[in-house]
Amino acid sequence: MAREKKRRSNGRRSPLAAAALIGAGLLITGGIYAGASAAMAATETPTTTKTQLTVADGEKLFQANCATCHGLDLQGTENGPSLYGVGELSVEFQVATGRMPLQMQGPQAPQKPVQFTQDQIEAMGAYVQSVAPGPTYPEDEILDGEGDVAHGAELFRVNCAMCHNVAAAGGALTEGKYAPGLSGTSALHIYAAMVTGPQNMPVFGDMNLSDEDKRDIISALLYQQEEVQIGGFTLGSLGPVSEGLFIWIFGIGALVGATVWITAKSN
């Protein structure tokens, strides 16, 4: 009798064995599901990996984020100007630099973190272009940075340095406005600024600067961005102004200090 009970007890499955069996089942099921999902993903067309936004998508984004100020018909309101004639290039510049949507009313729209993806920005620009055409994207050659750097630097000094500074470091204007520094500005946005005239900047059309001139200016600014400093104090790269101030404060100050020391020594 005792031997029969022992056999029965030995025939029972351990709780650990049951847990191991359940775990093995889950692993097998998960492996089959993962394999099936990978096979389905491999059979999908490449176009499903990236969502291509349309003009209709851009219209919805515009109505949700821009129409409050610029109007549903793009003709502007009391809070924002009309967008007729600005074109998709202006939309890309304003939104991709974070200037729009406007954070608050002020003398000038400041740059801030971008709120949309590049696809969304281009879709809104395409919608504006479809309703009220204006400046569009340039040829790749204009943005390649392979123009005449010396000629571009000369054109920049003549046409742009009075606001942006000869070193493209930016500068203050009147009534709280300012010309931004260009040290981190992309080639596309440099071109867009010249063509669309954002904020207080004038528009440089073909009568003022040809496409080749614009290419040279862009090349000069890109070259300046990549220039390696060979040493010494840059003093903001502002030229004679900062250099003269440095000499006046430290040079003249040192001479005055030396004079006072010599006088006290002699006395």
Image (cartoon, grey):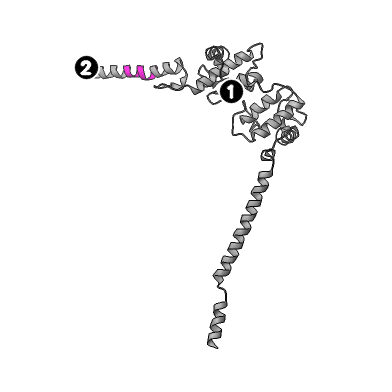
Q: Position of residue 211 (x, y in %)?
A: 63, 15
First reached walking from the N terminus: tag 2 or tag 1: 1
Mark 1 nearby-residue class (10 Å; few <14, some 14–19, many ≥20):
some
Task: Give amino acid for label 2.
Answer: Ser
Task: Give amino acid for label 1.
Answer: Ala
Q: Which residue is mark 1?
A: 187
Mark 2 nearby-residue class (10 Å; few <14, some 14–19, many ≥20):
few
Q: Position of residue 103 (x, y in %)?
A: 63, 33
Which element is circle 1 on?
helix
Q: Which residue is mark 2?
A: 266
Q: Is residue 98 magenta?
A: no
Main secondary structure type of the part rendered in magenta: helix
What residue range appears in magenta?
248-255
Side (left or right) of 233 relative to 209: left
* Residue 118 image-quadrant placement: top right
The answer to whether residue 241 shows anywhere in this view is yes
Q: Identify the residue shown where x is 57% and y is 74%.
A: 13
260 or 69: nearer the eye?
Answer: 69
Q: Are marks 2 and 1 in contact (CB under 8 Å)?
A: no
- Image quadrant holding the N terminus, namely bottom right
Q: Position of residue 120 (x, y in %)?
A: 68, 34
**Which of label 2 and label 1 is nearer to you?**
1
- Image quadrant holding the C terminus, namely top left
Q: Identify the residue shown where x is 56% and y is 71%.
A: 15
